Amino acid sequence: MFEEQLSIVMAGHVDHGKSTVIGRLLAETNALPEGKLEQVRTMCRRNARPFEYAFLLDALKDEQSQGITIDAARCFFRTAQRRYILIDAPGHIEFLKNMLTGASRAEAALLVIDAKEGIRENTKRHGYMLSMLGLRQIAVVVNKMDLVNYDQTVYAQIRRDFSAFLERLQIRPVSFIPVSGMQGVNIATRSTQETPWYQGPSVLEQIDLFQRREFPQAQPFRLPVQDIYKFTAQGDDRRIVTGTIETGTIATGDQVIFQPSGKRSRVKSIEYFHGPAKTSASAGEAPGFTLDTQIYIKPGEWMVRADQPPLQVGTRLRVNLFWMGHDPLVRGKSYKLKLGAVRLPVQLVEVLSIVDAAEQGTATSKQQVDRHDIAEVILETPKPVAFDLVSDIEQTGRLVIVDHYEIAGAGIILANVPTTDSTLATHVCAREIAWKPSAISMAERAKSYGHGAKFVVCASREGAPGERFARALERELCHRHFKAYYLGMDNVAQGLDADLGEHEEPQNEQIRRLGELARIMTDSGQIFITSLADIDDYDIRTLRLLNTPQEIVVIHVGDNPLLNDPPALAVTEGADIAPGLTAVCDYLRQQKVLVDFEI
Amino acid sequence: MQTLDRLEAHSVHILRESYREFKSLVMLWSIGKDSTVLLWLARKAFFGHVPFPLMHVDTHFKVPEMITYRDKLARDWHLDMIVGENSAAIAAKQTFPDGKLTRVECCKALKSEALKNSLSGAWPRKRMDHTVGELRPEAKPEPFTGVIVGVRADEEGSRSKERYFSARDRQHEWDVGDQPPELWKQYKTDFAPGTHVRVHPLLDWTELNIWEYIEREQIPIISLYFDRGEGRRYRSLGCYPCTSPVNSTATNVPEIIRELQSGRFANIAERSGREQDKEDGGGLETLRRGGYM
């Protein structure tokens, strides 16, 4: 009862006649709703224009006035074999992002070339894009053969040239079809009259020959953790890890590892609403999982099987990137990375080369990536990110970059670049070299204040136990005549971070600014206290680095499931915090931060 | 995977993505088959729960059965349901059925304007109070910035150009020519303050897919879609003055599927019974740019 459905994208240079070919296909397969054809004919009559099949798709007023497809329009038709979604991707360079959108939804592509004009810039660019998107099933439609009198030599020349180009992208087209969209030649059936020299399939026959792209079951299991739900309504007490499985299969009882945190558990159940109970799930499905142990993870981790190869983990990635942002990709600016369910800030470290898509050569090295460039770059994240190389697993080796709320770049990961260096460490080094020390040395200040400087971070789970403890600590230290100051993140948000509402990935920037602030506060010789909820080891490492050369004291208040690095001190979050305060004062005294002159 | 499984998984992914990314989220529920399938998909995505409110815009010209069905489902499925309307226009009889407006103008007033002002919280709204099982005025209508809508690409030309995540500016306007790219399950989920987002989880579904899924999942659907002995049924539900039933003797879901697959509707547009689409060259497109769903 349920038929198969396949998505196909139409790509090619502007004006090479994609829409006309599609209009023909729809008419030939009787896919046009009765009212539709008449509606377009009426519109043409009203505007005194000859009817064209292309108008069927260019259903929007904008498009008809410009005569080009500005977006990826979808239309539906069926053959005796199955149903199709045909995505009409625009050929104009301004609309490459729309073409990319269309092509990423497709399982096969028809790349249209005008026989008279031949291979043009966007013919090649689209070929390159399709290869980058991982679309390997391509048929080339040589259109407007009527304009070259169905000359076989024209067809053969295009076929030779374009095959050579695609060969370099590791693409071998399944066919080259000579057609005339205008005259309907080789669209539905093969025309022996116009092209007796052509033995291959018609466009419609080719479409039925395309293979369905199956979900990669044989690859290692990869689940980007999209969210963790605990809905309590109607007495539901399940804690469910969700996401759409990218590759592989999993079953109840399987041991799993979360990356990059490294936490382990076992699949207790596979959850699916209103359907038969499941004991296994595989690529393409979007079920939920409950686990044997209550582990604490955040969305953006990957769930993998313990008996299969894990993802790579690193902070520097070598990426082949296509840029479509209005502003260029530049160094020293923070962007947002999206990779599976990962959301992290990302920076450009280096442009290795700019690839000219049209010529496929390597252009001169510049240090930014401009609109419509394809570049090989090194990107850096402030925290380790888990990913696959595109050569290992295509689906999980892909990323996009967001600039000013828009997806501006799309890339495939070529390599994990090992490094001990980071942009942040380089920055701190440079900062410390340039830092002009005060005329009063730290030792003089400590003597005058009766204590040294420290940055005290009280870490806790969401909620207020960390803040409560930190505030009490400030009071306790003041009682003892120490120069202590507590700063809560809420206050920072109102002032120093007020502009971060507009920021792509504010959390990391908040940490960075706090670290810089701590550097200044500790330089003043004070004990600078703050409280942070739900931070991870990398946040602490960032603060430690930024606070250099002064020291940081990390205190765990209650349970901190995200933190694995040992703290200086751990205190409970109970009602009586006095023992905890004493413990911290004792610790600081041992560290010679506090010289107890009350005695 | 079967087509329906693929479609379901993809829609579920989009619903979860919007729930993860948007704080003030609402789902529009027109009571029709598409948005009821969407509601069902939300229950799939969130394992039986619907963790955001649903909004219905009541034009007061809906077939009365639709309201009865709506309230029953809201109670049965514990739905957090909000109802908005253009009470001023209805009270002043500034509508097409009252002879004061054209069909398109009436749609704009009773649907687009009502929706815009209900979403922003500017106009009074009602909310289902499950303790008494009735609609009660909402004390403080909060604004919504993420709106989940059940439009499908095969319905009509302008809808075929939509993204899964589609930005609207402060005036709820849609810039068709400059839409963000979507690839590899990565969508535009970052938005400047003041903009609002429409999420379209059903974009890839066809009318036939919808009915096949209703059949497979046994989703309770309003009986107006079936012939009840008069040789007529509704194919698309709207306000009764502007929506006419089609001639059909399909009395259940399998018969509708057969009718769509092979029968007489295979070549007739689904919205052919919706009169407002025909008023000017691009009736629905004009409406959509101004915020119509």
Image (cartoon, rainbow, N blue to C red):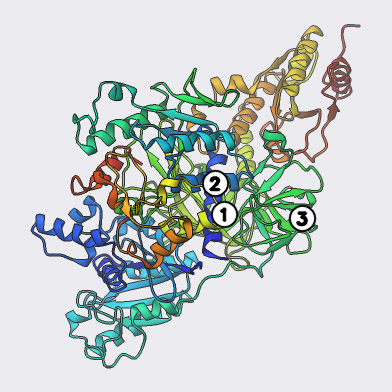
Q: Which residue is mark 3?
A: A256
Q: Are marks 2 and 3 on the same chain?
A: no
Provide the secondary structure element on which disc 2 rests.
Answer: helix
Q: Which residue is mark 1?
A: B217
Query: Which mark is on residue B40?
Result: 2
**Image x and y of residue A206, in percent:** 39, 79
Which residue is found at the position 63% from the left and 47% from the top?
A: A300
Circles 1 and 2: CB atoms closer than 8 Å: yes
Q: Quadrant of residue A9?
A: bottom left
Q: Quadrant of residue A459?
A: top right
Circle 3 SS class: strand
From this view, report whether residue A169 is shown above or below residue A89. Answer: below
Element on which disc 1 rests: helix
Callout 1 amino acid: Glu
Which residue appears at 45% of the width and 39% of the height? B29
B55 or B226, nearer to the observer? B226
Cα separation, mark 2 vs mark 3, equals 30 Å
